[in-house]
Every structure is written in C-alpha cells, then in structure tokens.
Image (cartoon, rainbow, N blue to C red):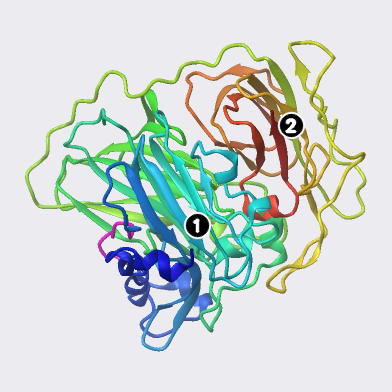
Amino acid sequence: MNRRDFLGYSALGALVLSTAGGMGFALSRQHPHSAAPAMLTALPEGGQALQPLPRIVNLSDAAGHFQSALTPAPHAVPLNDELEARLWLYNGKVLPLIEVREGDELDVTLFNELSHETTVHWHGVPVPPAQDGAPWDAVAPGESRQYRYTLPEGSAGLHWFHPHPHHGTARQIAHGLAGALLVRPAQDVLPAEVEEHLLMVSDLRLDVEGEVAAHTAEDWMNGREGELLLVNGQREPRLDVAPGTTLRLRLVNACAGRYLRLRLDAHELTLIGTDGGLIGRPRPLEELLLTPGERADLLVRVSERADERFLLASYPYERGWMGARPPHLDDVLPLLSINTLNAGVYPAVALPERLGRVEPLGEPDVRRRVEFSEVMPGHDDHGEGHADPHAEHGGGSDSHHHTHGPGASHAAHGAGQDGDARPEVDFLINGRAFAMDEVLFEGRAGEVEEWEVFNNSHMDHPFHVHGTHFQVIATRDADDEWREAPWLAWKDTVNLAPYQRLKLRMVFREPGDWLFHCHIIEHEELGMMATIRVN
C-alpha cells in the first residue's frame, strides 16, 4: 500500500499532514532581529501561552482502533520573515501526540520520506518484538511498513516514540523527530478537578542558515545539548491558572543528552507516576532529576496567592562533562512559567489512598551483571573488573546464557552521516561495542531476571531496556553498602551516577531480541548498546 492510497481511504486523511504546531509562532517571537545561534541564549523570554501537543488524527471510526500514518520528512518551520528552521518532522508536526486507551489496537503505517533509513521505536510500550522499531527492522528511503499491536492492560502511562536506526539515531533526533504516546487507563483514579498538561522537553541547535548544526566532538562524548531549550516546541511558554489549582504535569525528557534537574519556585512537587505508570502512593519531592528518555507524572497544588509568577526551571547538574565546557551548564534554565490569575482560590483536591499497584517481582531465576564503561585512545583497559557475561541461572553454574564472538569489539569512528568527525572513544557494555549480529545474553520468557548494572565510568549514564519494565530494588554508590529501595515503581529508564550500581528486576514476557543501552543517544550510537535474546 502506498502513501496516497492510505490517506485517500478517509476524508480525514488530509488532516494528518498538518503544518508544524506552535513552534514557528513561538520561535518567531524570539527572533525579531536576528537568527544567529550565538544570540539565542541572550534573547528575551518567550511568554506565549503554553500550547498543547499537536495531535496525530485517528483515521478510523471503529471503537478501540487507532489507525493513522507517520511520515518523517524534511519541513521548513518559519522563525521570522527571513529565516526558516529546516527540521525533520513526523507529519509536519513538532512533537506530535498519539492518544489511545488500554485495550486499543494501534495501527500506524510509516512512510519514510527521508533520505536515510529510519524506524519508529515505541519507547516504554509493551509491544511484540517485530513492532519495536529496532535497528535491524529499518525502513529504507521511499519505503513503508506497518506497526500494529494491541495495548494490553497495565500499559497506561505517558510513553513516546522516536527513530532507532543503526548509526542514524543521533542525527534524526537532533533534527526534531520525536512524539508522545499517551495511553489512558480504562478507568482514571485521579479526580476530575485535576488540570492535566503534557510537557515534552526537547532542545535544538541551529546554524545561521537555519540548518541543524552538525555534531561536535563534545556532542559525541557527552551527548548533544542544543542551545534552544523547548517545551512543546515553545521557548519558555506561560501557563495561566487560578490560585490553588491542582496541576498534573506529565513530562517527557526527549533530549538526546540533557539532564533536567527540575524545581518549581516556592512549591513542592509530588511524584505520582514514572515511566510505567502510576506508583502506589504520592511521593513529595523538593526537586526531580529527569534523565534523557525518562518520564515523570507530577502533581502540584499552585500557590493561593493571586497575580504571582512561579518558574519551573532546570538547575545545574554535574554529569561528568568531557572537553570544552559550554556556559549553559552552570545556568538555571527556565522551562515554563506558572502565573496565578486574579481570581478565586480553588480548593485542594483529595487524592485516593492508593494510586497504582506495583507488586514486587519476587526472587530471581536469573542473575546477570552489566557494566557500562568507556575507552579513550591509548588506554587498553576498559575499567576495573569486567562484568561476567554469563548469567547465574538458579544459582548454578550450568548457564544457558552466552555471548557470541571472542574478545571486545569496538565501534566504528570517522565521518558520521552528516559529515561530523566522531572522536576516538568507545562506549561499551561488558567490554563490547554494539554489533547488529551479536547477542550478549540469552534468556527465557516469563523468568524473573535480576541485573546488577554497574556504571564503571566518570560520567552519568541513563540505562534503558526495550520490551519490558523493571523495578529498582537496591542501589550502591561507589564504595558504599547496598541500600534497599524505599518504594517500587515500574521503570524503563534509570540513571546511574559514576561508579554507582543498581539491582534491577524484570520479566521479559515476549520472546525475541531486545535491546538495552545508554539513553544518551550519542553514547548508544558509539557502542553502548547490547542485545538479549529471549526464547
């Protein structure tokens, strides 16, 4: 089926190809005189009203069936009367939203209008392996493929989608390819008085011609951080609410390498959900660290004071920078201003005693060790103590899990797809760089696995696994003792500080090949990724 036939089957088809959302308008207000990237951080505040994410239209009128198309292609987004940003977008939309419910069938056809192969990875969604959008299922330029699966009970939460091609993910995400996937529960436990907003945070770097700038060596070593920090495609938008309003802020960190250390002026944050949906009970926080790929579900009761402005901002976070240090790492970076109106005070909202159910997974059938490390030129060591690639199965030594191929493999370097020079550094898992034809572990569907993940490096790395969610059951910082996790949540992405260890428990329900990797996109692309084959 070609793209024209697909869109032609419904009168709604033309709506799929709407223009870019609020980004052009929001950015045009930021560039009245100049579009030089060096000036972006010195521009005045945005202050435009927060816009919702633009939606991907459901072309099906059948209950419980979402059918549409995703067309990644180059698009020009106006910045001012003289300059356009040349991005790659799904359906011409900046950070589009697909909204479905548990039990729905999602049926999306990808039409690749890029000049490079691509995929759609459904990050955090329990999909069959053939629908995961892994790099070995890449779609060539001009070709199409269908993603079709049913969203099972328990899949409710805020997820997202992005490309995952081999040696092409970093460039495609830098050009703007990403979107949100909101799965509603069959029955929402939160009161209707709670006001919900989705906040998808991304960043962007443009040159003076409006082109997405090529990666620098520092981008590859650290993970790219663009100078323009955006929320829903807008720069520093504004949210106007009545005093006392209870807000539900559902956040996605869609940045390639940027960590968000979030605080809201004069307010406590209340965590009610993570990557895999609602947690058992609300957790009060002074601040929240949201790493690349992570999601968070927060409640905030806004101040009862009228005519006030409170800033949600990202504060400096030291994650182990290599090379020339950009000035913005030491700055407080505004994301969103919450302004209280001159209006009556809304009463506090009573929450249910229990939000979600996160049952412990129990004792493991399999134990594994996973080590993140990096190798610089002229250094033969991969850090202290390689992780044993062989799992302990049921406590015995007759493991059926194995790796393929002897010795450490290394990532390819040199010119990338966009002509940038990749530095001579390898980011490794268990001493190996990712190879498409290698399997690091083998496992069995339905078994409880316990992974001890060790960050044997001087910089933070967010660990992400495909095909399942995990529970963090214990943590150990550097040379300290193990500490049990005080509460459980379903996660698919979690940060590891330098020399930190985490114990994660998970179950792979679906047989197939599943990736796990650092979710700093450039580290993943330089080799910090591996495969587990589940039988």
Does the magenta run of residues contain 51?
yes
Image position of 254 (left or right of 467): left
**Would residue 395 appear left or right of 449 to someone viewing this image?**
right
Which residue is labeled 2 in the image? 370
Residue 34, percent from left and from top: 44, 84
What span is in magenta? 47-54
Q: Of the residues shown, which amino acid type is indicated by label 1? A: Asp
Separation of disc 1 and disc 2 at Cα?
A: 34 Å
> Which element carries disc 1, helix, strand or loop?
loop
Task: Judge from the rendering whether residue 161 lies leftward or rightward of residue 7; answer left or right.
Answer: right
Secondary structure under tag 2 reads: strand
Q: Residue at x 69, y 44 (%)?
A: 459
Percent position of residue 19, x then y: 35, 72
Disc sitting over residue 459 in the figure? none
Give the residue displayed 68% in from the left and 14% down from the top. 365
Amino acid type of the residue tagged 2 in the rendering: Val
Q: Please tell me the numbered disc located at residue 331.
A: 1
Viewer-nearest residue: 159 or 317: 159
